[in-house]
Amino acid sequence: MKTQQSRYAELETHLLKHHPWRNPEIAAVPIVAGSEACLRWLTTHTTPAD
């Protein structure tokens, strides 16, 4: 799953609450580089709608 750093805690809470495993592997990794189109897609699709 992908999200912005500012929304990580919200995603982690959701996953821990709804995942069937008692200890699912949840990890955050930084994106240090990416194509402009990919990074734009990430921003567009991980920003909450107002």
Image (tube, rainbow, N blue to C red):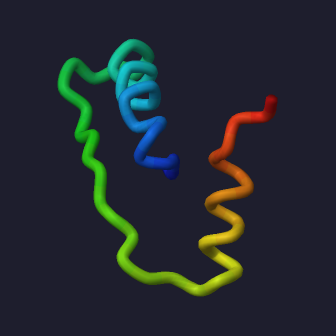
Q: Is residue 14 left or right of residue 27?
A: right
User: Residue 3: x and y, percent?
Assistant: 51, 47
Q: Residue furthest bottom?
A: 35
Q: Residue furthest right?
A: 50
Q: Which residue is rendered at x = 71% and y = 51% of the image? A: 45
30 relative to 47, above or below? below
Q: Which residue is rendered at x = 41% and y = 47% of the image? A: 5
Q: Residue furthest top?
A: 17
Q: Is residue 37 left or right of residue 25?
A: right
User: Residue 2: x and y, percent?
Assistant: 51, 51
Q: Looking at this view, is 6 or 8 the one in front?
A: 6
26 relative to 1, above or below? above
User: Residue 40: x and y, percent?
Assistant: 69, 70
Count of numbered labels shown in the rendering = 0
Q: Residue furthest left?
A: 23
User: Residue 46: x and y, percent?
Assistant: 63, 47
Q: Is residue 38 left or right of residue 25?
A: right
Q: For residue 31, which quarter of the picture?
A: bottom left
5 relative to 33, above or below? above
Q: Which residue is rendered at x = 27% and y = 40% of the image? A: 26
Q: For residue 49, which quarter of the picture?
A: top right
Give the quadrant of the C terminus. Answer: top right
